[in-house]
Amino acid sequence: MTLSIRPADPARPDFVGEVAGLDIARGITPAEAAAIEAGMDRYGVLVFRDQPLDDAQQVAFSRHFGPLEMATGDIAQGGQRRLSMEINDISNLDCDGAVLGRDDRRRLFSLGNMLWHSDSSFKPTPAKYSMLSARVIPGSGGNTEFADMRAAWDALDEETKALVRDLVCEHSQLFSRGTLGFDAFTEEERAKWQPVPQRLVRRHPRSGRLSLFLSAHAGAIRGWPIPEARMLLRDLTEHATQRQFVHAHVWRPHDLVMWDNRVTMHRARRAPPDQVRDLHRTTVADSAPTLEQAA
Ligand code: OGA
Ligand code: MN
């Protein structure tokens, strides 16, 4: 069977594709990688069902799309890490495989994934693609939602488009976690996660489509008073996450979901805190800081 992609929701033909005819664990060909990248250009999010993967297979697949990021945005370092530095640990587990306690710093930090965001927008060069592999899924809840930031841009009125077109935001994990009242950062983390600039409107290098580049990590706009900046970012996020722009992915074990962080935001939804939820994420870095990319 050859690779095919169809819209997850026929009513929304250019957002979220479902891929069939591929066995990722076996390894993919350059032609298949090119077809996937073309699918990403159109859909922004691709869903691959029934792909049992180990970390090495997931890394090998991910490398077809560019150099991988290291998981330096994680709060668990050194002896506390459960997985290798190429894997972002999107789980509620400690090194012994036990569910993290309610007050565990790693758990409280990871609740930030429930805010709408784009991965690694707090890094000077943010993420291109993320690949999230479902290893263990809870009995209920725990969906991941995706918002189409191209459609959100297209739907803005002309006055707002002109207002935001050339704005530059500052992104930091200190901002996103601060929204939740989490401030248990070490001095080292505070220094490491100082704000970085990102364009608010960007153009996809292949599709040419414009999109809003929003994220919970955005906490300032260059040249703007902070409250005015945060209010605009809040308004834009509210606009961009209206239900007509949002797709909810309901996880099955062995799903692999891949998204383009340049054109989407995503968020985790609540799951029962005592049930295991274990997903592994690989992340492909973008080519350059957004200010160095054509607008
Ligand atoms: C991520 C993320 C959301 C989720 O993996 O980057 O934000 O539903 N995950 O776990
Ligand atoms: Mn994320």
Image: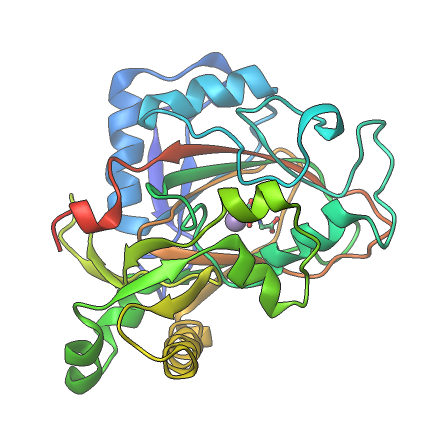
Residue drawn at (17%, 45%), measured in percent from left and top?
292
In the rendered structure, the answer to whether residue 259 lies left or right of residue 165 reads: right
The residue located at (25%, 45%) in the rendering is 41
| Residue 249 x, y percent position in the rendering | 55, 54
Q: Is residue 247 shown above or below 262? A: below
Q: Is residue 33 above or below residue 116?
A: above
Point out residue 198 in the picture as x, y percentages from the top left corner.
Answer: 30, 55
Nearer to me, 241 or 17 = 241
Instruction: Report the coloring of the rendering.
Output: rainbow
Report whether residue 10 is seen.
no
Name the quadrant containing residue 272: bottom right
Residue 177 in percent (x, y) is at 60, 60
Figure quadrant of the C terminus:
bottom left
Residue for point 43% across, 14% down = 27
Please tell me which residue is depicted at 67% across the width and 59% down the height of the picture. Answer: 183
User: With 148 as the anchor, is 115 left or right in this view?
Assistant: right
| Location of the N terminus (image quadrant) | top left
Q: Nearer the viewer, residue 224 or 6?
A: 224
**For residue 10, which quarter of the picture?**
bottom left
Above or below, 223 relative to 86: below
Going by the image, does 40 lie left or right of 70?
left
Q: How many marks?
A: 0
Can you see residue 180?
yes
Position in image of residue 106 (x %, y %): 73, 45
